[in-house]
Image (spheres, rainbow, N blue to C red):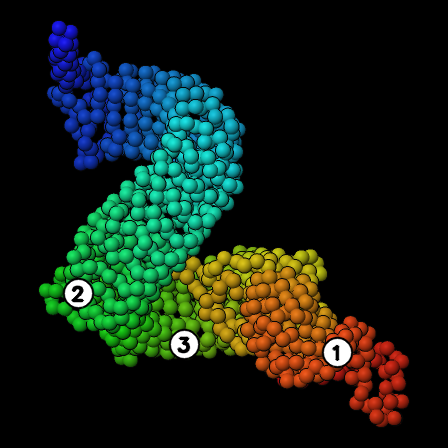
Amino acid sequence: MKGSIVSWLLLAISTISIFSEVAGASASAQCLGIDQRSLLLKLRNSLIFNASKSSKLVQWDRSADSWSGVTCKDGLVVGLDLSDESISGIIDDLSSLFKLEFLRSLNLAFNDFNYMAIPSGLMNLSRLENLNLSDARFAGQIPAELSRLRKLRTLDLSYLFNLKLEKPSLRSLIGDLGELRELYIDEVNVSTKGSEWCDALSSSVPKLEVLSMSYCSLSGPIDASLMSLANMSVIQLDGNNLSTTVPSFLANFSSLKTLSLSDCGMQGEFPQKVFQVQTIQTLDLSHNYLLQVSLPDFSEDNSLETLVISHTKILGRIPDSIGNLRKLSTLRLYNCSLSGSIPSSMKNLSELTHLDLSYNALTGRITSVGWEDLLHLKAIRLIGNSLEGDIPPALFRLPRLEIILLRRNRFNGQLIIHPNVSLDQLSVLDLKSNQLHGSIPASIFKLQQLQDLSLSYNNFSGSMNINALQRLGNLTYLDLSYNGLSINATAPTSAAASSFPKFYSLELASCQLRTVPQFLANQSNLEILDLSNNNIRGEIPRWIGTLEHLGVLNLSSNFFEDSATPPHNLNLTFAHVVDLHSNMLRGNVLPMLLQVDYLDLSRNNITYVIPDKIGDSLLSIPLFFSLSKNNIHGSIPKSICKANLKVLDLSRNHLSGTIPDCLMMASLMVLNLRDNKLSGGIPQNILPTCGLKTLDISGNLLQGQIPLSLANCATLEVVNIGDNQIDGKFPCHFRAMSTLRILILRSNKLHGEIRCPYGPSTWQKLQIVDLSSNYFSGTISTSLLTSWEAMKANANFDYLHRFVPRTGLFYQDRVIVTVKGQQLELVKILTIFTSIDFSGNRLEGPITHTLGNLNALHFLNLSHNAISGSIPSVLGNLHQLESLDLSQNYLNRTIPTQLANLNFLSFLNLSNNQLVGSIPASKQFLTFSESSFEGNLGLCGLPLNKSCSITMNRTEEVGDDRNNDDSEKKWFYLGIPLGFVFGFRVVCGPLVFVQSWRFAYYRFWDKVLFRHSRS
């Protein structure tokens, strides 16, 4: 009986529910009253919108039963969603929109209101609970009237870049919004301190659940008052300058699902307790370079779905427990100093879609990871590690994989792609800069959705017919450069040529091409073409000038020539980067390249005289202009200063005359006039607007002094004035150049002391100093060496280069240094390369102990001076030292045994000194030849094959007595006339008893010996 009653009740309830739903649906279709319809139509007619892009407004009609984007109840409009309707123009305060007084939800996001102020008419909508104006191009001050909307539960003013929150302040805006649950004001300029914005939130909106205030110019710290917001589930504070530690109290938010603190200047150690919040799904700590993170042992009940810790400092390895994050879909640990291998437990991440472990120090093989189990994986990025072994063939069977980026590793197997490959979605395959070998598998041409393919800088071999690319119809980017490949570029048939992929970038450098592929003539979409470093001969095809979209052309390092017509007939109207260096081009007229930003014609046979009015001519001078190592004659005209040059390289030519003063201009970053026949002086009247970063005028006939006004080029990083006839003293006025990295004054007539008596220098970045073969005297300055911070700690591994605007390319600095007794040209200057060369001067006195503090120094040359005293044992602290040359001095005492601990020392020259005692017979010293020690009469032991007949005690006694050392010098000088009685009485007697005579005599013989050593 009871069961039947219950059944009847359930039937009755369900019947009533069905009728209610039907009635509701009918009411919903016709809920709008006449007045409400009229207001909506007036609103529609007042708005400017694009009907072709509209999906809502375009359907509004008086006779319509339903109105898209409109929600109604009891004949009244309670919800209006006009987001992304391509609305433009403005809404004034009299708009019919603000007469819809029963609105609870209003969404105007993703429109264009032309930077108008947020209309104050919104205050009429007092029933509003949800207001969304995000990315709708409102601007100005947020109106105070918004604070009257006291029923608001959601307020979204995000991504309104020109919106400010000053009057009212944040506290004034939200002070009466006690019902607010969600606040989005990303990219609104709030500009308040941590204690202010935290206290305003905690005291005004106690029910807040979502806080999104990214890029609001907030400052830190994050105040503990936020703890009162117990319902918080989303905290997004990206892009603010909080500059503080991550507070551990964030782990107390029991409902926290999202914590995003990207690019906030966070520092210190990240509290591991936050990882243990069981509800957290998204954690983003990226771009906090001073933040240290220790990955915990993840529990199996962890809810993480997105973990992004890129550009931080992760201590240690990826834990095996990473496999417990079964819900994880995105893992980005990019550039985190991670070490170790990728754990095999990664195969348990069955929901993973995006994996990025790029630019770490990961090692080992990746074949142990069960990639075949990651069926949802869409992108894998492992760039810039030290991973090795084979690339797992299983990757090419994953059904959803779209991106494979494995470049800059040590993968060294063969590339295996099975013939039955089923990877239909793969669009990007980048294996550049590995050690892969063998042939390129034919099955790669089955990846028909492939758009980007880069296999350059590997060891692939064999031949490939260019026609095979026809099967990759979607391919737009191809880079096969610098392998052992031989590309057969025979022209396809006309039908095949029409079906060829339409490339925007094609790079076939070093592919043993002998001709320019003819099919390129039909590549109307081509933007980048690189055929450099091949064996292509003949003329540059004129049809290249018909490629209207070609922006970058690199035909360098070939055998192109223009015997019949000069290269000015190469008409590249649209190209902005043209690199033709290292060919056989000749002629006396430059190409007419009107839009070129980057033009490199260096290392050709161009005979050219720069015209006097080059800056006034129709020839457009590019930002980067290099004619280095040609046959350029004449002088440098002043009119060239009218061009907006960034890089001017005219080095290694036959230019004569003087350097125009105006070349030291604000726009120019690089001026290289090395190895010409320029005369006169260095330009004098250099303005404070000088923007030079590289100045190389070495190897000319320049005279005079280094001008004081050169210090106006305060951003200089490379100064090379070597191999000229410059006179004067050490350029202490360069102290204004705080960015100086390389200073070369070699082989001039500079004199005086190497010191700056008027205050410390600011050369903290100085890494290469070459003052050799001048006439510098005095002792080595301790205070000067103390400021050379770059030689005390290892720098980041990078090359010294100059970015050329609008080209995406760099100018590579070059210098010649003396390394291990031989001159070497550094084509690429590493920031970790450090060198000091003071050789061939008149320096005297002892070697300063300060040199022992330069722990990052690689090369030290103090040879051919008059340095005396002992070799400091602190030089044994220079553990990076590769070359040490102290030859041709007056060094005495024993060789410190600490030098044997210099494990990287491969060149040592201590010859022609006055060293005594036993040569250390251990470690590195066992590798040096006799020439490293010859000319020291008191030295013994290997490799001199001279037994040590005197005791060590005697050696130390002689070495410790400095007065005896001076006495030995004195008797050495007096020994020659000692046998002549008359000479002893007439010359030697006064020398012994008259101090001024004695010093003058010593100086005379010093000069004789010094000149002999320099010759």
Tell me the CA gap for discs 2 and 1. 80 Å
- Is residue 494 shown left or right of residue 440? left
- Tell me what residue is drawn at x 47 percent, y 43 percent: 293
Q: Which mark is residue 951?
A: 1
Please, what is the three-letter code of the amino acid marked with disc 2? Ala
Please, what is the three-letter code of the amino acid marked with disc 3? Asn
In the orientation shown, which residue stands out farthest toward the front? 1
In which quadrant of the rendered view does residue 549 lie? bottom left
**x then y, percent, for residue 860:** 60, 70
User: Which residue was labeled with disc 3?
Assistant: 630
- Tell me what residue is drawn at x 38 percent, y 57 percent: 364
Element assignment for label 2: helix
Asked whether the viewer can see residue 864, the reply is no
Q: Nearer the viewer, mark 1 or mark 3?
A: 1
**How packed is label 2: few (under 14 Cα within 10 Å), some, or many (20 or more)?**
few
Please, what is the three-letter code of the amino acid marked with disc 1? Thr
Q: Could you tell which of marks 2 and 1 lies nearer the N-terminus?
A: 2
Q: Could you tell which of marks 1 and 3 lies nearer the N-terminus?
A: 3
- Tell me what residue is drawn at x 36 percent, y 17 percent: 151
User: Which residue was labeled with disc 2?
Assistant: 468
Question: Which quadrant of the rendered structure holds the N terminus?
Answer: top left
**x then y, percent, for residue 43:** 23, 23
- Is residue 494 shown left or right of residue 340? left
- Is residue 145 shown left or right of residue 551? right
Q: Could you tell which of marks 3 and 2 lies nearer the N-terminus?
A: 2
In the orientation shown, which residue stands out farthest toward the left? 495
- Tell me what residue is drawn at x 52 percent, y 62 percent: 832
